[in-house]
Amino acid sequence: MSSPTVTYLADYRAPEFLIEKTHLTFELHEGYTDVSSQLTLVRNPQGTQAAHLVLHGEQLELLALAIDERTLNAEDYQTTPLNLTVYNVPERFVLHCKTRIYPEKNTALEGLYRSGGMYCTQCEAEGFRKITYYLDRPDVMSEFETVIIAQAGTFSTMLSNGNCVSDTVRDGNRIVHWHDPFKKPSYLFALVAGNLACLEDHFTTQSGRQVLLQIYTEAKDQDKCHFAMQSLKKAMRWDEQTYGREYDLDRFMIVAVDDFNMGAMENKGLNIFNTACVLAHPASTTDAAFQRVEGVIAHEYFHNWSGNRVTCRDWFQLSLKEGLTVYRDSEFSADMNSRAVKRIEDANLIRSVQFVEDAGPMAHPVRPDSYMEISNFYTVTIYEKGAEVVRMLANILGPEQYRRATDLYFSRFDGQAVTCDDFVQCMEEVSGKDLQQFRLWYSQAGTPHLQISDSFDADRQQYSLTIRQHTPATPGQTEKKALHIPFKTALYGDKGALPLTINGQNKGTETTLDICQDQQTIVFEQVTEAPAPSLLRSFSAPVKIFYDYQLPQLQRLILLDSDGFCRWDAMQSLMRIVLCNAIDGKDNHTEQTVLIEAIRQLLASHSTMDAALLASMLSLPNEQYLASLYAKADPVAISQARTQLQNQLAAELQTELLHCYQILQDQAQGLSAPAMAARSLRNAALAYLLQLDNAHYRSLAQQQFAQADNMTNQFSALRALVHAEHAHAIAQEALQAFYQQWQHETLVVNMWFQVQATRPWGNVLQEVQNLLHHKAFDARNPNKLRAVIAAFANQNFARFHDKSGKAYQFLAEQIADIDQRNPQIASRLLTPLTHWHQFTDTHATLMRTALESLTQHELSKDMYEVVSKSLS
Ligand code: BES
Ligand code: ZN
């Protein structure tokens, strides 16, 4: 295959033409759709006066083309598979174009496609060019008018962005006319047509305007939209209160679709959601999924300002909208639920996924320099690291200055397409701080490593911390500079946090050190006892820290630290020490005892602490994270060590776990935050107990499964049974009952698939292959592929890394097949194989072989980029 072209940030040029108005007419027919466009084009004064107009367009049948009233002849234009060039165009003109497309044949789910009985669109990043010829780039912002025409009676719902101007029937056709008064790039265009039910509500904005809120779904899912509606109203209020941002249209619509490559999409006034991210009902939705719905609803809503009103100049600036919006939604979730637990989840994701991406062949900066296929760059680096970069800025400025800086950003750039640097400049202007070094966070890839050493001088009452930073090389970037790292620190004595004095200045009990040099030493004065340093508090920067904790220091932080993240992190460190000793075959007795006693003490204090935090402190570091600690990880040894420790903890702590499980029963009822927290702790305890070969614990799980009145309890019991090695017969029964009960709820059937694909023991590969033939499986539906194939490859470390290498080959074969239908999903499924360099030679070779087998196929651009970068 010839390599696709590479797009470089350095090659950015302003567009030659602008599109003042975009008028689209869609004629929906059975089997095909005709799209007529009228584009009011004007030359861009910032361009280079090019004679020709070059538009994007892919997989389009061109039916008619005219400028103003003049139909163009064959010599006036040229088409290629990617473009339409119109020669020698005037300064200002209207281009009339008619194209035919085939939504029912669109399996890539990009552009206009069909999902079930309905039509819907997905245009980000470059899908609009599959609908009509256009300047499909985010710095071309236009006012859109859309007319949708279909035979009367075919669809009850016909939607597009903005306000509905008219809805009429003429000559047997229904004609619906939409107008969006706000200029937007084509990636925010949306159209939906189908037979949908609608939940309606209203929101009064802070300035007193009434906004109509609508959530459209298939009629059978109507009762599952109330939670999303409440979440939307909370998000709207939060954005007014926290950022002063008010909604701008009279109507905000959400549509749920079954077939969707991503979670959801922020199209102006017409968000389109994967059903998995909007539908929720206690009987069929877990607590975790409820929180996901709340977070995704907020995220897409927040884009109305951070993304839509102010958008990206080009796709290299993707983190401008995604990093900022993830930061905004994570703060919203922290305000709505447990702040500490949300921070732990985010830190854990960065550590076990983003750091791994940063250490691999796909490593890239928050603002990449180049790409082959932009769809491959919707990554944890752009999203999560990008959000951490905004968080660091917010912390450096403090709440008042950060708010003034975002106010300036939104007002200065309203209606414009801008860059990450424009955002940082607002931060700089408002604060008066020099952020030159900080800007490296956008351009430099890789995770900074901080080597930390300390010394305590009891006579002089001085405690010093020496911090050395170093960022390992990443592909194409070997020289790394020192970054500006805000490093939040406290010192813990025997009784609690110690007062901090630096250079004679009192700093309270917590301080943010600005680490800017390769090496820095900080001296704390008047320190009266040898402290336990509480480092990187609240995960103040996305960095790896290396500090040799003594066991008593960790014990102290686990019990005393006021920062939830640090308490959790101290427990993770203790667990990591025990696990690594086991993996390395070292004697472990003391460490194990300390760990067991620490957990025992925590469980004893469950009534005085956040149960959700306690639950997260009980979970062992995940395998992916453990693997990242080794230059060449042995996946089999890692899973074994982890399972053994799980068993040991269960055996040693069963009395306390069982007590916790029983005593929290009454508190675990209902949908309140404390009830959810109690459930998470009880279910964590239950999962531990099921590790033991004990009929009583099995019957507890069986009872919980049978009697549960909510999905969290039912599914936790099911998972505990299925994943336990000693419960096979009961688990099979429960699986069958679960399917019987939920076979008509697509999203629950997906959980049923997932729980089987992630079972850590037995011949799961064979079972996964069987599931692909199950009648409920559908290889064209991304959620199903995620529930079976992605779940197996990403969440079943033990079985995916089976030493035979058969699972690697299986994944490669599946991906080759999926790539022919849906390149975006195929390319995403490939991620676990791109981590081959992390593993021992035997595994690495088998993983590479699987990757190499893919080069035998005709690959999509998406796949070519990931395969070739992974192998080079
Ligand atoms: N703009 C994206 C959706 C998107 C990404 C569409 C890539 C097309 C290509 C949307 O705002 C988003 O980021 N969605 C996330 C969920 C969010 C909570 C982080 C998603 O879909 O996973
Ligand atoms: Zn987003």
Image: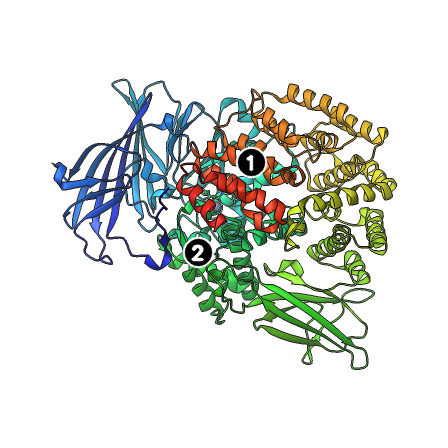
Tag 1 residue: 809
Q: Residue 269 — which label?
A: none
Q: Report if residue 215 is visible in the image.
A: no
Quadrant holding the N terminus: top left
Give the secondary structure at mark 1.
helix
Label 1: few (<14), some (14–19) or many (≥20) C-alpha neighbours in 10 Å? many
Task: Reply above or below: 240 against 82.
Answer: below
Q: Amino acid at mark 1?
A: Gln
Residue 621 horizontal/vertical position (percent): 70, 49
**In the displayed structure, does residue 262 sit left or right of residue 806?**
left
Residue 181 falls in image quadrant:
top left
**In the displayed structure, does residue 582 sit left or right of residue 838?**
right
Q: Amino acid at mark 2?
A: Pro
Residue 81 horizontal/vertical position (percent): 28, 39
Judging depth in this view, the residue of 737 and 418 nearest the camera is 737
**In the displayed structure, does residue 667 sit left or right of residue 838?**
right
Question: Sequence order check: which comes first, mark 1 or mark 2?
Answer: 2
Residue at position x 74%, y 43% in the image: 640
Tag 2 residue: 368
Residue at position x 75%, y 55% in the image: 577
Judging depth in this view, the residue of 366 and 477 nearest the camera is 477
